[in-house]
Image (spheres, helix red, strand yellow):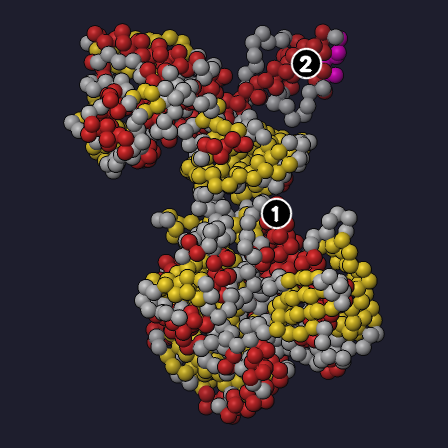
């Protein structure tokens, strides 16, 4: 195997590229379907060993998981596991989704035929045709972004749910389709009346194919300009050119807040709006300037206003030439006659909308009410010198005419005399229907603040309309009752109790009927206040008012987008929630050596180990629930240890996400008798001595004072309970895989979308198993302290038996990490990998926060172990992780063939290591030679700087299952 | 030998070759317990009847061994012999297995303490059937 710098190293057909010392890559191109490359941290020797089993294949398999971020990582101790390699680390994004008009979901899963999906160009298409349009709008962290459609699937004949909101959104979807709610993604089947769901009440116009007629051809320009435009796909410019929507938006906005200056095209507006505008300029193939900001004083009505002006300019002669040819005036707009460009007028409504939204982004005022309940008529204005007023009026009439096509009415053009100039104001109707059409189909481009208010106004107006409609229906019904001779009290009692009417209203409707439509009742929220509370990024929080089942026999469609985060949580990761803890003592090797046989025997007797061992703690059903819901604080409360022990566990020894109701009775059955047992296999309880200190400062902070100091290491997990949780959910996840139409390369990588019920149930159960594991190690530590007390006849506190840290190395966590320049909450999976956070992270206990998190890498029986400290590079290289142990090198069968248990024991005893095991066979299986060299593993971690070595620890006495 | 242990880096890789699929499932159970207990040490003193339903044959094997591990771990039931009474394709398309387990309460002093099997896995699992009805199973036990 070639292992030179930069060499491509084939190993079992898997290409490996050496990027740097100890950093290897499996290119994403290795297999179709890999979403990210593989990344392996190992020296030349360790990587060679990994290439001998399935480690690298499994690393590549994990790279297939939907939503995996950046890379599929293998730690230096990596070896073959189930689904994930042992030593595997991967992170997944948590929140993302696609917008369908009205509802924000996780992907567009399973919406019936005809459901509208919004595209980035502001028009809607039926879901079954969405893939012809390439892109859809997604919501990512509450911001709308564009995403490519990469896959489309169809299912048939499933019952649907019809969810309606106060703000008038109605969505029909399958009950497994998750929707974004205030408390995260929730399956629609679990949505109730009153749930706040995210909506984006912009629908745009329906798509219609534009005419293919040529608007401009290369003969319209000088050859040099023509070439530049051709390169950008802007020539020939036909009616169906894919750049037209962006071009129309820019043209509309330019007629409001744009100007030419020399070779530059300049745009002015809000900072956020100018960033949006830059994206359109880039999409057209031009390079915009950054957003410039300057303070500027302006005079309006003789008053001076100080304001901030943000601008973007584009230096491109070809853009200016293009805009001029399309009918944009070259000089001062108020001194020039111009009309709406003909190509806009000839386009279908959805394309006209691009132009109108651009123009309104600059020239139309924001949605605002007079009194909280009635909107001011929106006004679009322009200013003209007296000689040019006529063309200004004609221009606004064209706008007015176009708006008719959107169901928006206007109320004429008003002229305001400004001396030598006239301000022309096109006033739009304030009727609710017209406003809803205006703001749900046209809106404002490059003016996100107004656009968000427009979305809120649509929801608010619909809510208002439904309440006033209801009041009218009730008034009419009461009048009808009266006319047929029904008594007042009978009429009043026919009104539903949750209707938006009070007694006075019923009385008035009965005795003095109103002639006009009823108004909103008292207590109805004022628009401005409601908008403030309901706008969140680009979404509007809206309350569910109805959920109804609906029979449906047609097709449902599911499209998958390439947005980098489809939020998957993979199940195969978490097997036993094992972990390690390290406990100090103030004893010295020379104190302990003479008493070693007695101490090891006392520990072996105190901590049940081996096959079928039962714990010293009998738990009732209720107590077991408390253990798995609460973790270490439960144990401390029951007297197993000190309060500070909990603080020195990862997560405080308690995952708050634990939920015992998500753990099956079967799993509970396996867990109830095993609390406080070591288990068998590679788990151990070991008395060790500090062999060498490498980092004095960190060692001191961790309480490691000197070489020769005696410490205890405990390596165990969540026992049968954790395994059963894993088996149970493997089948749940298998169903999820087919339900959500996921493609995975290995059955053990079964997973479910983050936010789905399956994923959240699993997370609750896995957290419960983690808590069980922490309590298990806590009990083992407690009895170890007692064994020391019994042997040295001194209480554990006086023996300085303080716990350094307890770190898990088999779990999935929600953690905050930097990704793509932003801080994000991710799911980080560590399968046989240890969290290794550097100094400063808030998760690190206060007393170590200046130093970094203690990291414990246990060796195998009879070999050294390491205490390390999380390094700053762990965040950039491995989502804050490092290795977790030595990693097997020989199979158990091979080890048994190679070693005799009794020889191994004799050999260890010859080196002064006392050994006590339930079964002699285990000793052969776990022979030191069967494992990779832990020194190498720790050294790679140290060299990479993901966790640096603090001290090397060597065994004195070992007890094994 | 109806089953054998193949080489595997960290766990137990089992191969079972039996005259029928039902027998193969019985032998798979025996293999799982041989990992944990001394062979031939368990007597038939009590029985457990169980039924396993699964969506496909691989899942049936997984759940079958998983259930045996549950009875050992949670109830201390040491298996002497498994008797598969029926193994058939269900009308719904899945698979269904009924069995009677023979064994006794686990006693480390009598049955020995070899290595605990933590979990069944799908790793390297394969199930193949020959023309004469012979069945071969391969699977990995996580220990």
Q: Which residue is mark 2?
A: A477
Which residue lies at the image location 45% right of the left edge and 32% below the top edge?
A133
CB atoms of marks 1 and 2 within 8 Å: no
A301 in relation to A78, above or below: above
Q: Could you say whether the residue bearing mark 1 is in a helix, strand or loop? A: helix
Task: Pick the quarter of the image with the C terminus of chain A.
Answer: bottom right
Task: Pick the quarter of the image with the N terminus of chain A.
Answer: bottom left
Which residue lies at the image location 37% right of the left edge and 49% below the top edge?
A820
Magenta stretch bounds: A485-490
Distance (Cα) linking label 1 and label 2: 50 Å
B31 in relation to A842, above or below: below
Which residue lies at the image location 19% right of the left edge and 18% below the top edge?
A331
Q: Could you say whether the residue bearing mark 2 is in a helix, strand or loop? A: helix
Q: Which residue is mark 1?
A: A738
Q: Does residue B92 appear to the left or right of A127 in the view shown? A: right
- Quarter of the rendering containing residue A953: bottom left
A348 in relation to B80, above or below: above
Counting residues from the start of the chain, the first of labels 1 and 2 encountered is 2
Q: Does residue A932 appear to the left or right of A555 in the view shown? A: left
Residue A387 at x, y percent in the picture: 21, 7
- Quarter of the rendering containing residue A768: bottom right
| Residue A511 at least partly seen | yes
Residue A348 at x, y percent in the picture: 42, 19
The numbered mark at residue A955 is none
Give the chain of mark 1: A
């Amino acid at each position: 195997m070639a292992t030179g710098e930069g060499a491509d190293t084939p190993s079992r057909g898997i290409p490996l590229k050496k990027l740097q010392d100890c950093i290897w890559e499996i290119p994403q191109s290795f297999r179709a379907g890999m979403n990210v490359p593989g990344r392996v941290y190992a020296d030349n020797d360790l990587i060679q060993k990994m290439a001998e089993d399935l480690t690298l294949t499994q690393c590549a398999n994990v790279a297939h998981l939907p939503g995996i971020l950046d890379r599929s990582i293998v730690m230096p101790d990596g070896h073959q596991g189930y689904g994930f390699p042992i030593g595997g680390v991967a992170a997944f994004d948590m929140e993302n989704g696609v917008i369908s008009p009205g509802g924000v979901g996780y992907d567009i899963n399973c919406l019936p035929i005809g459901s509208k999906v919004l595209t980035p160009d502001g028009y809607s298409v039926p879901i079954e045709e969405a893939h012809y349009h390439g892109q859809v709008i997604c919501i990512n962290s509450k911001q709308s972004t564009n995403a490519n459609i990469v896959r489309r699937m169809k299912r048939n004949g499933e019952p649907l749910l019809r969810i309606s909101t106060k703000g008038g959104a109605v969505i029909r979807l399958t009950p497994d389709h998750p929707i974004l709610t205030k408390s995260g993604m929730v399956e629609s089947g679990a949505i109730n009346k009153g749930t706040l769901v995210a909506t984006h009440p912009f629908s745009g116009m329906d798509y219609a194919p534009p005419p293919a007629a040529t608007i401009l051809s290369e003969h319209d320009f000088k050859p040099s300009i023509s070439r530049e435009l051709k390169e950008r796909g802007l020539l020939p410019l036909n009616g169906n050119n894919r750049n037209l929507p962006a071009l129309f938006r820019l043209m509309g906005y330019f007629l409001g807040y744009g100007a030419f200056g020399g070779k530059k095209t300049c745009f002015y507006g809000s900072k956020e709006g100018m960033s949006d505008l830059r994206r359109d300029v880039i999409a057209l193939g031009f390079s915009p300037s950054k957003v410039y900001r300057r303070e500027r004083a302006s005079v309006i009505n003789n008053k001076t206003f100080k304001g901030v002006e943000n601008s973007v300019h584009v230096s491109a002669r070809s853009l200016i030439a293009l805009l001029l040819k399309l009918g944009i005036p070259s000089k001062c707009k108020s001194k020039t006659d111009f009309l709406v460009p003909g190509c806009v007028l000839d386009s279908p409504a959805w394309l006209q909308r691009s132009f109108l939204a651009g123009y309104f982004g600059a020239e139309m005022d924001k949605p605002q009410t007079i009194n909280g309940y009635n909107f001011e008529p929106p006004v679009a204005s322009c200013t003209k010198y007296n000689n040019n007023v006529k063309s200004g009026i004609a221009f606004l009439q064209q706008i007015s005419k176009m708006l008719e096509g959107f169901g928006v009415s206007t109320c004429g053009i008003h002229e305001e005399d400004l001396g030598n100039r006239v301000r022309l104001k096109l006033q739009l109707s304030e009727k609710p229907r017209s406003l809803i059409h205006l703001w749900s189909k046209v809106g404002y481009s490059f003016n996100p603040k107004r656009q968000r208010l427009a979305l809120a106004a649509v929801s608010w107006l619909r809510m208002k309309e439904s309440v006033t409609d209801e009041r009218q229906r009730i008034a009419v019904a009461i009048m009808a009752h009266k006319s047929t001779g029904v008594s007042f009290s009978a009429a009043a009692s026919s009104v539903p109790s949750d209707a938006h009417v009070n007694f006075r209203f019923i009385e008035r409707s009965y005795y003095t009927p109103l002639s006009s439509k009823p108004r909103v009742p008292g207590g109805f929220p004022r628009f401005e206040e409601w908008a403030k509370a309901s706008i969140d990024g680009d979404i509007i929080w809206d309350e569910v008012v109805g959920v109804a089942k609906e029979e449906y026999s047609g097709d449902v469609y599911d499209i998958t987008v390439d947005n980098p985060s489809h939020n998957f949580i993979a199940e195969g990761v978490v097997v036993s929630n094992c972990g390690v803890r390290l406990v100090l003592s103030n004893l010295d090797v020379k104190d302990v050596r003479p008493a070693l046989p007695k101490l090891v025997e006392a520990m072996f007797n105190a901590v049940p180990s081996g096959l079928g061992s039962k714990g010293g703690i009998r738990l009732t059903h209720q107590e077991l629930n408390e253990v798995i819901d609460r973790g270490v604080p439960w144990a401390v409360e029951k007297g197993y240890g000190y309060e500070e022990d909990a603080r020195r566990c990862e997560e405080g020894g308690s995952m708050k996400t634990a939920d015992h109701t998500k753990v099956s009775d079967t799993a509970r059955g396996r867990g109830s008798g095993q609390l406080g047992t070591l288990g068998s296999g590679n788990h151990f309880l070991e008395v060790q001595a500090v062999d060498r200190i490498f980092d004095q400062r960190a060692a001191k902070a961790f309480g490691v004072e000197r070489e020769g100091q005696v410490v205890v290491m405990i390596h165990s997990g969540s026992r049968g309970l954790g395994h059963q949780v894993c088996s149970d959910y493997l089948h749940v996840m298998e169903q999820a895989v087919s339900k959500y139409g996921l493609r995975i390369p290995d059955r053990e990588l079964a997973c479910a979308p983050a936010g789905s019920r399956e994923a959240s149930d699993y997370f609750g159960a896995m957290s419960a198993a983690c808590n069980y594991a922490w309590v298990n190690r806590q009990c083992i530590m407690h009895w170890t302290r007692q064994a020391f007390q019994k042997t040295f006849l001194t209480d554990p506190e006086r023996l300085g038996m303080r716990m350094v840290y307890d770190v898990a190395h088999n779990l999935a966590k929600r953690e905050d990490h930097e990704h793509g320049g932003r801080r994000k909450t991710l799911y980080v999976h560590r399968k046989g990998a240890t969290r290794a956070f550097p100094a400063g992270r808030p998760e690190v206990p206060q007393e170590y926060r200046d130093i970094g998190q203690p990291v414990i890498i246990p060796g195998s029986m009879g070999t050294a172990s390491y205490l390390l400290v999380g390094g700053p590079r762990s965040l950039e290289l491995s989502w804050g992780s490092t290795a977790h142990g030595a990693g097997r090198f020989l199979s158990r069968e091979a080890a048994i063939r190679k070693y005799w248990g009794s020889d191994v024991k004799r050999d260890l005893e010859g080196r002064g290591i006392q050994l006590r095991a339930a079964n002699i066979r285990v000793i052969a299986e776990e022979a030191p030679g069967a494992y990779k060299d832990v020194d190498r593993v720790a050294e790679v971690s140290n060299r990479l700087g993901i966790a640096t070595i603090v001290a090397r620890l060597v065994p004195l006495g070992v007890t094994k299952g | 030998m109806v089953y054998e242990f193949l080489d595997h880096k960290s766990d137990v890789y089992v191969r079972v070759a039996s005259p029928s699929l039902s027998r193969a499932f019985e032998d798979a159970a025996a293999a799982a317990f041989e990992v944990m207990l001394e062979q031939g040490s368990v007597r038939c003193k009590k029985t457990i009847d169980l039924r396993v339903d699964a969506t496909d044959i691989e899942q049936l094997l997984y759940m079958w061994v998983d259930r045996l591990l549950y009875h050992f771990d949670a109830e201390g039931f040491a298996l002497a012999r498994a008797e598969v009474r029926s193994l058939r394709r269900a009308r719904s398309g899945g698979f269904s297995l009924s069995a009677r387990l023979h064994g006794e309460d686990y006693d480390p002093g009598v049955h020995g303490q070899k290595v605990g099997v933590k979990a069944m896995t799908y790793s390297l699992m394969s199930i193949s059937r020959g023309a004469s009805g012979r069945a071969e199973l391969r699977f990995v036990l996580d220990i």
